[in-house]
Amino acid sequence: MYFFRSGMAPRNLLPTALAGALALVTWVTPADAAFTPISATFFNAPTDGILTFTFEGFSAGATDHMIFTFNNDELLTNQTTSVGTVVQEAVLAGQLYQLSLHVDQTGDTWSSNRAFNSDGSFHLASTNTFSDFHLGATAPTAVNTDCVVAGGCYFGWEDLPGGDNDFNDLVFALQFIPTGLRSVADVSVFEPASLPLLGLGLLGAGLARRARRAPPS
């Protein structure tokens, strides 16, 4: 399955090359799997582009909905979204973006920004080894390029306060691809293909003016 959503809504204006775009620390779960928790600065778009979310699976009894916070788009639901589903969001250069996870059974909503979480804990983490989630040795949809976190394409949520920190309640891959799209604030420019036509138009206008100005013979 494949979906595309434009994230260019004006409200709340939220690979390896993105070093410094995320504030990260090291975390080790009780299962000894190394994760990198996501803190306040989740994703600061370095240029206009597309964020691509690929659903990789889950291990949770609760129903969890992952939300693209700035425009409230529901991206993935662990119990009903098909594994392998891809959802895309357009993002704007210089804009800060966050995710959240709503848990139906408890009513909790957790943020990728730890400061917004009522228990003060990390609820989203990344890793470059899919098997850390204990959902299988390899990802159903392998992702290893254009990763938002250098060396860490895979992300997972912990949906309970004081949980077991296996971060596998909703697992997804996240990639960013710059598009070079101009922002809506930029002025329009001529496409290269239109320049010859423009030149012909100006030439024709100039000849017409000369014809009008020529003295009668």
Image (spheres, grey):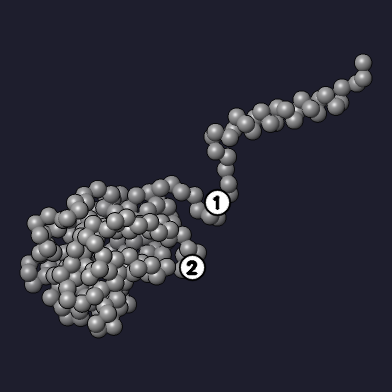
The amino acid type, in three-letter code, at marker 1 is Asp
Residue 165 in the image: x percent, y percent? 15, 73
Residue 128 image-quadrant placement: bottom left
Residue 9 in the image: x percent, y percent? 48, 63
- The first of marks 2 and 1 along the sequence is 2
| Left or right of 183 in this view: 138 | left
**Which residue appears at 27% of the width and 80% of the height?**
104
On the image, numbered disc 1 is attached to which residue?
A: 186
Residue 127 in the image: x percent, y percent? 18, 60
Total number of numbered discs in the rendering: 2
Tell me if residue 176 can be seen.
yes
Task: Find numbered disc 2 in the image and state the secondary structure of the residue it sits on.
Answer: loop
On-image quarter of the C terminus = top right
Q: Are marks 2 and 1 in contact (CB under 8 Å)?
A: no
**Which residue appears at 46% of the width and 68% of the height?**
12
Separation (CA) of disc 2 from disc 1: 18 Å
| Left or right of 127 in this view: 7 | right
Q: Nearer the viewer, mark 2 or mark 1?
A: 2
